[in-house]
Amino acid sequence: MANPIYPIVALNGQEVSVRFLTAADGELLVDLVQRLSPNTRYLRFLVAIEEVPVEAATRKLPAFLAVDGVDSVALMASIDEDGIETAIGVARFNRSSGSDAA
């Protein structure tokens, strides 16, 4: 099944692509977390993390990449920087256990 890309234009005029996260996006997620400021990391993970070693981030990837497209969905926003896809954000949605509502 193809992974459709939804192009949008940010308020600053930057072209952004939004698509479903896939199991192949591990490197993009590691890079995204490493580029976050210490304050943003704190707000995201609720713990002070000055730097994120690649090995530590890679070990945690399976949980972040585990989406089934039904009960667990993740969307990734990315930009093109000189022909290289760069992740700029991820949104996750998980259905409550035992519910058919999202």
Image (cartoon, rainbow, N blue to C red):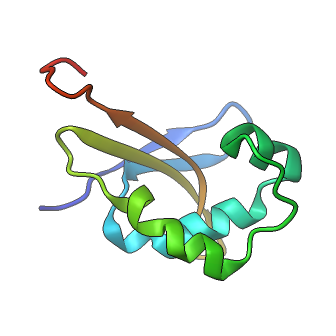
- Residue 42 location, x and y as percent? 79, 44
- Residue 13 location, x and y as percent? 69, 40
Q: Measured along the vertical axis of the image, is residue 33 above or below residue 38?
A: below
Is residue 84 among what the camera can see?
Answer: no
Q: How many marks?
A: 0
Give me the residue at 67% from left, 46% from top: 14
Q: In the depicted view, which residue is nearer to us: 73 or 84? A: 73
Is residue 25 among what the camera can see?
Answer: yes
Q: Measured along the vertical axis of the image, is residue 36 above or below residue 82?
A: above
Q: Which quarter of the figure has residue 71?
A: top left
Q: In the depicted view, which residue is nearer to us: 37 or 14? A: 37
Q: In the depicted view, which residue is nearer to us: 38 or 46? A: 46
Image quadrant for the C terminus?
Answer: top left
In the picture, measured across the screen, residue 38 lies left or right of residue 6, that is right
Q: Measured along the vertical axis of the image, is residue 101 above or below residue 7?
A: above
- Residue 48 location, x and y as percent? 83, 50
Image quadrant for the N terminus?
Answer: bottom left
Q: Which quarter of the figure has residue 44?
A: top right
Q: Measured along the vertical axis of the image, is residue 53 above or below residue 12?
A: below
In the picture, measured across the screen, residue 90 lies left or right of residue 22, that is right
Give me the residue at 26% from left, 29% from top: 95
Give me the residue at 14% from left, 24% from top: 98
In the picture, measured across the screen, residue 8 lies left or right of residue 5, that is right
- Residue 52 location, x and y as percent? 75, 69
- Most extreme residue toward the bottom is 55
